[in-house]
Amino acid sequence: MPEVQYIHPDYFQVDELLSDEHILIRDSVRDWVNRRVKPIINEACQKHEFPLHLTKELGEIGAFGPYIPEKYGGAGLDQISYGLIMQELERGDSAIRSAASVQSSLVMYPIYKYGSEEQRRKYLPLLASGEKIGAFGLTEPNHGSDPGSMQTKFEDKGDHYLLNGAKMWITNSPIADVCVVWAKDEDKIVRGLLLEKGMQGFTAPETLNKWSLRASVTGELVFDNVKVPKENILPGVKGLKGPLSCLNSARYGIAWGVIGAACDCYDTALRYSLERKQFSRPIASFQLTQKKLSEMITEISKAQLLAWRLGTLRNNDKATAAQISMAKRNNVEIALKIARDSRQILGAMGITGDFPMMRHMMNLESVITYEGTHDIHLLITGMDITGINAFA
C-alpha cells in the first residue's frame, strides 16, 4: 500500500485553538482514513459501490453519533470533535462522510432528541456501533427545497398508522435497517416515524447511473399502505422544526467535512506543482500557479476559522440556523472551486483516479445541492439580515 503523503494545511495555526483531545481524535480518524479509505476509494467510485465493510469500523472509531451520550452508545464528545471527524472522513471521500453524517445527525440525533426512552435504548446503541444502518426520509420527488408541501402522509387506524407516499435521493436507503421518515398526519402536521426494513409495503429501490457520490448508496423510500406500530412515532416533536433541526446538525457537519476535501485537493496540487517541471522549471514557480495556490489556502483558512467559531457557538447552544446555513454554503462553494482549480494545476493527470480532485469535484457537485441548495442558503441569509422572506 503506497504511503499517504498528506500534510494538513494550517496557515493560521488553527490547531492552537483545539484541545489536546480534539487533536487526538482528529489524528486518529486521519490515520484510519489513510489506512482504510484512501487505498480503496477510487475503485469503489469507479465500480459505483459503497464500501459496506467500513460501516462497523466507522462505529469502532466513534464516527457514528459522536456527540450522543455514552449511555446510548455514543462517545459524548463536543461539537468541534464531531466537525473534525467529518473533516477527516470527507478528506477520504464525501460518501464516507455522508454515511456518518446521515447516521449521526439525521437518524441518531432525532431519535435521541425527540424519541422516547424506549426508542433511544432500542436503536441508538445499534446505530452507534454500526450494527444497524439508518436513513432519513424528507425529500420527495416533487418537493425538495419546499418540504412543507410534502405529500407523504399517514392515517390513524386505531392500533397502528397507515403510511403512504415516497421519498427520493435518500442516502443509505437500500441498505438501511431503520429509517426516520417525516410525513403528515390527518391534521397535516409533520411527524417523525421509525420504519424498519421488512415492513410490508415498504421498499427502497436504489438510484443508479450517478456521476456524483458514486461510492455512496442512494435510493428511494416507497410506502404502499405500510402498517407502522404506534410506538414507532417520535413523541417529542411536531411540525417542520423536527426535520429542520436535524438538517442543522447535518449542515454543520458538512461545513467541516468539505474542508477536508478542499485540503486534500490543495495539498495534492501544491505537492504536484513543486515536482512537475515545464520549461525547465517547477510549475509552482509560475505566477498563475501561485495565484491559484494562494487563493486556495486563503479560502481554506477562512473556512477553518468559520467552522471553528461555529463549533464554539454550538458547544454553547448559541449557533443559529442562519449561521449554520452560511457556513455550509460558503465552505461547500470554496471547496468546489478549490477542487476545480487544483485539477487545472495537474492538467490531464487531474482527471485520473491516481489523484483525488476529479472525484472530490464530482462529489461536491452533489454536496452543494443537498441539505439546502446554494441558492436557498443565500436566501436564508438574505431573510436573516433583511427580515424579508424571499421564498413567499
Image (tube, grey):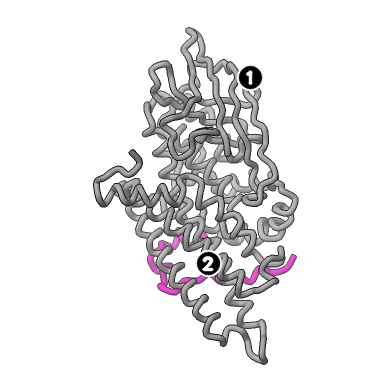
Residue placed furthest toward the top: 158
- Against 220, residue 23 (above or below) is below
For the residues marked 2 and 1, what is the alpha-carbon distance in whole angstroms? 45 Å
- The crowd level at tag 1 (other Cα within 10 Å; few <14, some 14-19, many 20+) is few
- The crowd level at tag 2 (other Cα within 10 Å; few <14, some 14-19, many 20+) is many
Q: Which residue is mark 1?
A: 201
Task: Please report the residue visible at 69 percent of the width from the left and 69 percent of the height from the top.
Answer: 3
* Percent x, y of residue 85: 51, 54
- Against 339, residue 180 (above or below) is above
Task: Judge left or right: residue 252 versus residue 382.
Answer: right
Identity, as a three-letter code, of the amino acid under mark 1? Gly
* Percent x, y of residue 14: 41, 68
- Against 176, residue 294 (above or below) is below
Q: Which residue is mark 2?
A: 338
The part of the image, by quadrant, that contains residue 113 is top left
State the SS at label 1. Answer: loop
Residue placed furthest toward the bottom: 280
Q: Which residues are magenta?
A: 1-26
Q: Is residue 10 magenta?
A: yes
* Percent x, y of residue 325: 39, 50
Q: Is residue 315 visible?
A: no
Q: Is residue 280 magenta?
A: no
Q: Is residue 12 visible?
A: yes
The part of the image, by quadrant, that contains residue 356 is bottom right
Identity, as a three-letter code, of the amino acid under mark 2? Ile
